[in-house]
Image: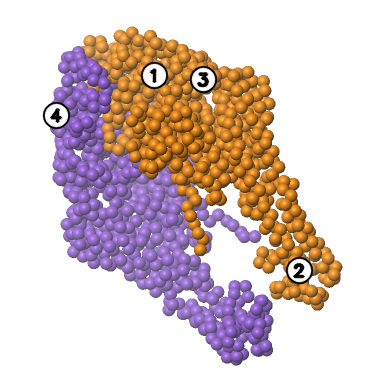
Chain colours: A purple, B orange
Amino acid sequence: IVERSVTRVVTPGTLTETELLRSDDNNFVASLTRGDEGYGLAFLDVSTGDFVATGPDAAATVRDEIARFDPAEAIVGPDADGECFADDCMVTAYDPAAFADDAARGRVADYFGSPDAHLGGEAEVRACGALLAYAEYTRGGEGDGAGDRLDYLTHLTRYDPREYMVLDGVALRSLELFERRSVHGSEGAALIDVLDETACALGGRRLKDWLRRPLVDADRIEARHDAVEELVADPLTRDALGTDLADVYDLERLISKVSRRRADARDLRSLKATLDVVPEIRATLAEVESERLRDLRARLDGLDDVRGLIGNAIRENPERELTEGGIIADGYDETLDELRETRRAGEQWIDDLEAQERERTGVDSLKVGHNSVHGYYIEVTNPNLDAVPENYERRQTLKNSERFVTPELKEREEEIMNASARADDRELDLFREVRREVGEAAERVQRVADALATVDALCSLAAVAAQYDYCRPTVGADGFEIEGGRHPVVERTEESFVPNDLTLTRESPLAVVTGPNMSGKSTYMRQAALVAVLAQLGSFVPARRARVPLVDRVFTRVGASDDIAGGRSTFMVEMTELADILRDATADSLVVLDEVGRGTSTADGYAIAQAVTERLHDEVGAYTLFATHHHDLTVVAEALDGARNLHFRAARDGDDVTFVHEVAEGAASASYGIEVAEQAGVPPGVVERARDVVAERAEDAGGKDAGEGG
Amino acid sequence: IVERSVTRVVTPGTLTETELLRSDDNNFVASLTRGDEGYGLAFLDVSTGDFVATGPDAAATVRDEIARFDPAEAIVGPDADGECFADDCMVTAYDPAAFADDAARGRVADYFGSPDAHLGGEAEVRACGALLAYAEYTRGGEGDGAGDRLDYLTHLTRYDPREYMVLDGVALRSLELFERRSVHGSEGAALIDVLDETACALGGRRLKDWLRRPLVDADRIEARHDAVEELVADPLTRDALGTDLADVYDLERLISKVSRRRADARDLRSLKATLDVVPEIRATLAEVESERLRDLRARLDGLDDVRGLIGNAIRENPERELTEGGIIADGYDETLDELRETRRAGEQWIDDLEAQERERTGVDSLKVGHNSVHGYYIEVTNPNLDAVPENYERRQTLKNSERFVTPELKEREEEIMNASARADDRELDLFREVRREVGEAAERVQRVADALATVDALCSLAAVAAQYDYCRPTVGADGFEIEGGRHPVVERTEESFVPNDLTLTRESPLAVVTGPNMSGKSTYMRQAALVAVLAQLGSFVPARRARVPLVDRVFTRVGASDDIAGGRSTFMVEMTELADILRDATADSLVVLDEVGRGTSTADGYAIAQAVTERLHDEVGAYTLFATHHHDLTVVAEALDGARNLHFRAARDGDDVTFVHEVAEGAASASYGIEVAEQAGVPPGVVERARDVVAERAEDAGGKDAGEGG
């Protein structure tokens, strides 16, 4: 009977197996509680040790932060509910005892010292404490008597959502930052796909984190821009770093495995190989001038002691299996070396035996062999059995031969087996000791990993900027002033992309955008939002020149299609999103509205669009781009001081309609639809009648409908 | 060296392997040519022998017919091009020689007699001839010297597209007859899924064919309705038929395999098992009264000769492999029986040998055995080797025993092997002869298969009608008069479904349908089209009472979403579809328009909608349902003699909006959109302003915008 006990609980959020995880993205488990003064929300990546917490004061903020981190799993306290998590997130109501104030406080203190020094309030402490308890409960390990404590959890970072640009779930999805929305199965890229030129997994995760949380502090943003600028200007350094970083293994996950006693000898060699690169990277960064890069260089500790230990102790190309030897290097341990020598000598003796016995017996076909059941034997073919000496003992009869052993051979065999077994045990003991010692350096390794991650992310931004001709944006400006802006994703997939300008000022922050479907309205509006996001995460932007404000939040209402979601009216969803915007947008927000009010009567839809436009203009003052098919809205925009009209045109190209994708001041000509109908083969009488109807109604409306331009 | 030659070419359209085909659907290869007077278009299912041809006079009709049959593969002549085929259809420009007039004519004559007796014109003959050549080229077979001719191709049916309701690709897709359009990955059913209760593959394919080609001839439709009505009223007969039909194998594909010499012995037994059921089905149908069912009964030839032949010749549960015996029944062939007896006697002798030799030698542990390398042997363990008689010859030495043979044993072994080999050869010869004889009955088997397919399809229609409370529609009426109509697919998935009435008369054939999104407009309109399709394919319909006209074509323009297809403007696509409708619709067509003109300015979109409405009303006179958000259109409808308004309402239910899904006369109240905005949390000031805007504009437009109702 094999005794079994639970040594590990596997859940979606606490996976640590590298094979099961996307190397270039975090895999978070979230923890949510609710206290008297707000919520406590924490995210932990068990595989890397990334651990952050925040204390949102509103349910909407909780939802926004969850959308940012997109956890695979969540635990909730008895006072909170899991409805704010996505459908594909596994939510568990975890043991209330773990969320209890004292228990949580004690656990946080145990790991990180005084909770109050790290966290904002009681709900946050409870979220973090419970998350630690859960991580311990589900921990992986060899079951070799290690304690429950997770030594690699060395950092807990508290953040305030207001330190970052708010990107709610709607914005993340409609701007396609991380995931392409499927358009009928056709393939496509998300922003992260065109932005990620990182060389290692550490950098990949760092870049995703930056994209998840663009900054709102001009100094921090400019520090990144400085570093990117320096790397853009210095392709040699960038290339050298890229080459070095390509040799960097996933240090965070490696050291986490070491701490959890799940690392094998190859993991340690990978760790050493990475540390070997660090001095080279330091050297490459020797001449850098930007403060950020100099600071990163200073943090690149080579960890010579750890490198030396692994280098001395662990073989190159060690075995994956820990219990069968082949792990520890020669010369590291005297006892092990002696055991190996004994084994080697025994094996040599056996190797010599064949020649020796051939000579003694005069049988040239005599063979010494080994099989796994009977061990070593001397084999003599039937015709030669007469020559077998007296001390041979028969062990096995085959069709054409007999197999024998001798007392000496048995003795040597015994010796080899003993030495082997003891050597294997010794190797395992030594390995565990080395792994423990390496584990003690977890915090230092994590600091190096952190620095490498940032260097890689900055290099990636520089590489993209250089290759795709991005410019350094000025942040903190009083409005958007973009010359020759492009959509970073669309420009990669289209054969030719037409750049466009955008100006939105404090005085004139609102633009109504008209033009036919497919003319480029949606791309243009999303492009503005993406430029803002890129600039604030520290990237250069796809434009000839760009001045952008510090946007506190990007709102999008992009009515992509009449998708039916659980039978709920899409119009209701649309109005709810609109209400959120009108409630939460500030003068520093960027609002992108695409076709508001399509799910209802055109009269109501129009009225809502006009009322929303007026409210955004008169009271909110947010930077706003509003695409619409309601041409009457262009008349409204003309009458408002802080609003103006932009339009996209379609041109006729023989029998077909083509789009020039160029934005221009003023409202679009309203005659496009009927022209297309005509070209599509709608009978002339019907086309003529449609023209009459337009004219009649314009007249009826007292010229109100005749918004012209372009 | 193994000589290889091409014995078969495998292509998507000429697959015959049952494992690779959907048993319940046809797998067509199409052939297209163009002649002076029109097109030639043919479809062949190689696996079943279904072969139809038609001669469309316009490219649009070619496209429509291709959409109907949805071929997996197509060959085109030198005068035609393959652009009218779907993207997933493999199109080959096949050997022009095969399309040549003389060659094609000769080939068609060879199979079916005079081409002119079967086909409409030169282009059709060329399409069919080339398709026969292609089928021969790609034919499957044993390579046993069979000729190129495909004996199971016994029927070529010519049809005129005007014999059937036209269902173009747009209609097939938007009505979801065969395939559910994916709505963001959510699962769902197509019409065929809820309609198909057939018991066997034959019936499944027949039902699909009916759905692909609804009839336009009242007599033919009513003949099906009569049969369905009789089966609805007689659940006992229906159940009995269902039980019998469940034992029916895929007769068409079986006989096709037989003819192509690819059938094995189990296929023949399956064929017999099916023929065994036929008399029972005949008996079950003994009392039927409807002409159609009586005619079917008369066509149920039991094929006693074929059944007898297979029953006598082929074992029950024969081996799958043809070359290793175990196929032919005992008593069928004297020579085979003798060979088997020789083998049996030899084996018996060997069976007896062990006892006999134990007695002779006194060795109780003596064993007679067989192994595949050395054949039969007598085994004696080492301690008993002394007792081995003289006539034993040593054959093999094992560790603890020796194996021997005797001359008698060797002789018997030889005898058995000879008899076995000759028996196997004999069985294969006999089997091929039986298969050839069965193949000669191909045409009779196909007639039975055809009758069984129709009985199954009618039973399926009756089962659905009985289970889901469908009513028998009156066809050929002067308009639609549906009481308590339901959507056959949606009613299965929704917990409660609200039935609705529909009246469209010759005098008033057009209805403008208003109401908020999700209120039920789209379901209501599609339901009307589905009732028409169901009625004309011979089915009862989901309604309390239904009178429907004979619709020549269903047109749909359902602007589901702003899907981007290859960068082409969806608005352009929409207008092209609209142009097709205005060009081709007749007073006997049913036109379903959902939201025309959304991709352009609202002014243009409205004007086009109004002009189209007027054209359909004034000149086309088609039965038309037109859903719109343009409430002004309801005013237009009021002014037209043959038009009226229908609407769906939304109701407030506490904080949420619910839809009652009830259609009512008159236009929808236009105030819904702003109410929803209010409930969704749009600030009161904005809501109030929106109400003012609506009021102002209504006033400006001289009351034109104030369409009210419900």
Quadrant of the rendering where the N terminus of chain A is positioned: bottom right
Q: CA distance from mark 4 to mark 2?
A: 104 Å
Picture residue at 74% right of the left edge, 71% below the top? B404
In the structure shown, which secondary structural element does the residue marked by tag 3 occupy?
helix
Q: How many marks?
A: 4
Left or right of residue B247: residue A448: left
Which residue type carries mark 2? Ile
- Comparing marks 4 and 2, which lies closer to the viewer? 2
Tag of residue B220: 3
Picture residue at 51% right of the left edge, 42% below the top? B149
In the structure shown, which secondary structural element does the residue marked by tag 4 occupy?
loop
User: Which residue in the structure is indicated by mark 2?
Assistant: B378
Q: CA distance from mark 3 to mark 4?
A: 60 Å
Image quadrant assignment for residue B379: bottom right
Task: Name which of mark 2 and mark 1 comes first in the sequence.
Answer: 2
User: Which residue in the structure is indicated by mark 4?
Assistant: A710
Task: Name which of mark 3 and mark 1 comes first in the sequence.
Answer: 3
Which residue type carries mark 3? Arg
User: Which residue in the structure is indicated by mark 1?
Assistant: B589
In the structure shown, which secondary structural element does the residue marked by tag 2 occupy?
strand
Q: Alpha-carbon neighbours of circle 2 within 10 Å: few (<14), some, or many (≥20)?
A: many
Q: CA distance from mark 2 to mark 3?
A: 77 Å
Q: Position of residue A697 (x, y in %)?
A: 21, 15
Picture residue at 25% right of the left edge, 56% below the top? A459
Which residue type carries mark 1? Ser
Q: Alpha-carbon neighbours of circle 3 within 10 Å: few (<14), some, or many (≥20)?
A: some
Which residue type carries mark 4? Gly
Picture residue at 61% right of the left edge, 82% below the top? A378
Image quadrant assignment for residue B683: top left
Q: Are marks 2 and 1 in contact (CB under 8 Å)?
A: no
